[in-house]
Amino acid sequence: MTACILHGSTPVPHDLLCGIGVAIYDFQTLIAGVLAIGAAYYAARPVWRQLKDTNLQTRIQHRETLMALLREAQDRLARVRKSVADPLMDLDRLTIDPAGHVEPLGAEDAFAIEQRLHGELDWYLLGLRGTEEDSIEVLKAALKIAMDDLLSTLNDVHWIEHNEQHDEDHDISDADWVVIRQRSEEAQTLAAVKGATVRSAMRTLEDAQAKWIGDLRARIAKLDLAIAAAT
């Protein structure tokens, strides 16, 4: 067997050297590919790190947006409740006796409650119309209809007591005056029913707002877990 001398004294078979050379030749593409992948991996690490940091920043910004929405929703809910709670409670006190029977509402009381409720929710029902989820907007519209109906009924109760059939502002026929008086008498007992309708619409809206607040909290909690895992 022909042998080659390596490092002065150690004999290396020629076939072994040839085999190594052939192996290197045959797998040079694979070796180059592995080296290229390794180089690409180390080159890409800063890019992936930057992408990870970008995703983390996006999550943090998204969380801040959701927190702002949550605070705003909570403030709206609290303010809506406060705006109508006392007037509606007084309306119940004036129109429902301890046994639960409906009592007619007097003209002065009707006027006072109308003044307290008139325009009280305009900031929300009109000024912030179209700023919430569609399901909540539908309930806001329903509340506005119920509120307008109650205000109209309260006005019917006291209008005839504060106006004359014939004066510088009115010249109402006897037939129309009879209709107005009859409508006023009916409104005295209808006020309690209209108030209950407003309260029901309020309760439904509050439930929807509370659900939205709960959804926001759940989304924030999910983001908190993702942010914690990324840091």
Image: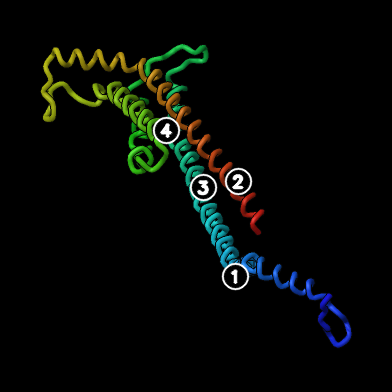
| Location of residue 23 (image quadrant) | bottom right
Give the distance between the C-alpha atoms of the residues marked 1 and 4, in whole angstroms: 50 Å
Q: Is residue 124 left or right of residue 61?
A: left
Sequence-first tag of 3 and 2:
3
**Dot 3 surroundings within 10 Å: few (below 14), some, or many (20 or more)?**
few
- In the depicted view, which residue is nearer to us: 80 or 176? 80
Residue at the farthest bottom position:
8
| Colouring mode (rainbow / by chain / secondary structure / one colour) | rainbow
Q: CA distance from mark 4 to mark 3?
A: 19 Å
Q: Which mark is residue 135?
A: 4
Q: Are marks 3 and 2 in contact (CB under 8 Å)?
A: no
Amino acid under label 3?
Arg
> Disc 2 vs disc 4: which is toward the camera?
2
List the residue tagged with mark 2. 222
What whole-number distance in Å separates the C-alpha atoms at marks 1 and 2? 32 Å
Q: Which residue is located at x 55 percent, y 62 percent?
A: 51
Judging by the rendered image, the residue that carries numbered circle 3 is 71
For this view, does 76 lie left or right of residue 164?
right
Spatial CA span between label 1 and label 3:
44 Å
Residue drawn at x 45%, y 22% is 92
Of circles 1 and 3, the one toward us is: 1
**Quadrant location of the C terminus?**
bottom right
Asked if the residue at tag 4 contacts the one at tag 1, i.e. Cβ–Cβ closer than 8 Å, the answer is no
Crowdedness near tag 1: few (<14), some (14–19) or many (≥20) residues, C-alpha within 10 Å: few
Viewer-closest of 174 and 21: 21
Decide which of tag 1 and tag 4 comes sooner along the chain. Answer: 1
Q: Amino acid at mark 1?
A: Ala
Instruction: Tell me where residue 29 appears, x and y as whole percent.
Output: 62, 67
- Which residue is the site of mark 1? 43
Mark 2 or mark 4: which comes first in sequence? 4
Q: How many labels, in total?
A: 4
Q: Mark 2 belongs to which amino acid? A: Lys
